[in-house]
Image: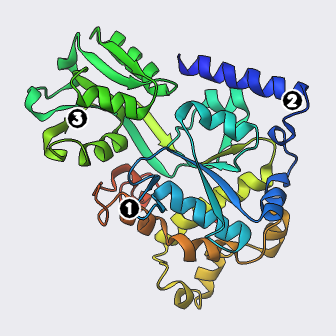
Amino acid sequence: MTEKTELLGVVLLVALLTLTGLAPAAQPTDGKTLISVRARGVLRCGVSEGIEGFSSRNAAGQWTGIDVDFCRALAAAALGDARKVEFVSLRTSARFPTLVTGEIDVLSRNTSWTLLREAALEVQFAGVIFYDSQAFMVPANSGLRSATSLKGATVCVQKDTSTMNHLIVYSTALDLRMTPLVMESADDASDAFLSGRCTAYTADASYLHALRLHAPGGAAAFTILPERISKEPLGPAVRGNDDAWLTLVRWVLLTLIAAEELDVTRENLQTRLRDPTIEQALVPDDTVTRAIGVEPGWTLRALQSAGNYGELFDRNVGANSPLGLERGMNGLWTRGGLMYAPPLR
């Protein structure tokens, strides 16, 4: 199944539910999502089935990761308590149906921002929490050092993702004649690759880094090839037609980025707020807060929960995590990266 086929199925599902009156949450009016979240007292956040560094359960059964911590920051902003989150583990094929029919309030699940998804499903992406790209991984002892050496190879790939489409386009453009082995889930695809059914595995580079940590032989047993064949801007998504909720989700993320730009951390937040310029840069006008419908101090609650973007990155996927990823594109714009926050005022 291609991604277009998946999206068509979601569109037909939503249309059917709407006609039968079973999907009132799929077409929210402005502000309805926040009202529902506050009435329920819990934020429902859609996450992955388990990708280390992004959303996975630790040994104690607690959810951890950059997508998870973002949801906690959003809960702190919306409900005043970062603990008031219900994490809903979703297969790739279930992520958009679950969002558009109102079963979750936000999708924070390593999902790429595309026009097709926004236009066909009437969902909206709030921003980019992680700039990623699609790559190939091969066994280190394979001798393969470039994606162009994969001509005629069988490549494991997960269905219901844009990854499949990018693989076909790349293979066709370079006449590599790759044969995709399409698997139902990320776990199925990784199992097929690790069992030797494929020469290579293609997925988001961040996922490949996470996979090889726990693969037989460890990270040293696998090589991620240097080519990057697509742009994968990953970020939280919400249903359309609720601008107030979109604004809240977007600016929780942007506040974390802005705080790093200003060197404001979880630890020094209260001290730095004594500076009027810092307070003006991180605390929105009361008129804006009322328009969104949230309690005052929401940006500060989000920061106190997650820390700034650099802290969020480092503890989950960066220098202070098992993944140890470099900031690269996810660095601040002042340091050669793409992370940039517009001003609050």
Secondary element at image label 1: loop
Residue 17 disc label: none
Q: Outermost residue, front direction?
A: 60
| Residue type highlighted by circle 1 | Ala
Q: Measure the alpha-carbon separation of dots 1 and 2.
A: 41 Å
* Marks 3 & 2, CB-CB < 8 Å contact: no
Residue 59 disc label: 1
Could one spot residue 341 in this view of the protein? no
Q: Which of the marked residues, 1 or 3, is nearer the chain's N terminus?
A: 1
| Residue type highlighted by circle 2 | Thr
Q: What residue sits right under mark 3 in the picture?
A: 226
Q: Toward the viewer: 211 or 326?
A: 211
Q: Which residue is drawn at 54% across and 66% down?
A: 256
Please provide percent x and percent y for residue 124: 68, 41
Image quadrant assignment for residue 156: top left
Residue 18 disc label: 2
Q: Answer with left or right where residue 278 lies relative to residue 243.
A: left
Q: Measure the alpha-carbon separation of dots 3 and 2.
A: 46 Å
* Marks 1 & 3, CB-CB < 8 Å contact: no
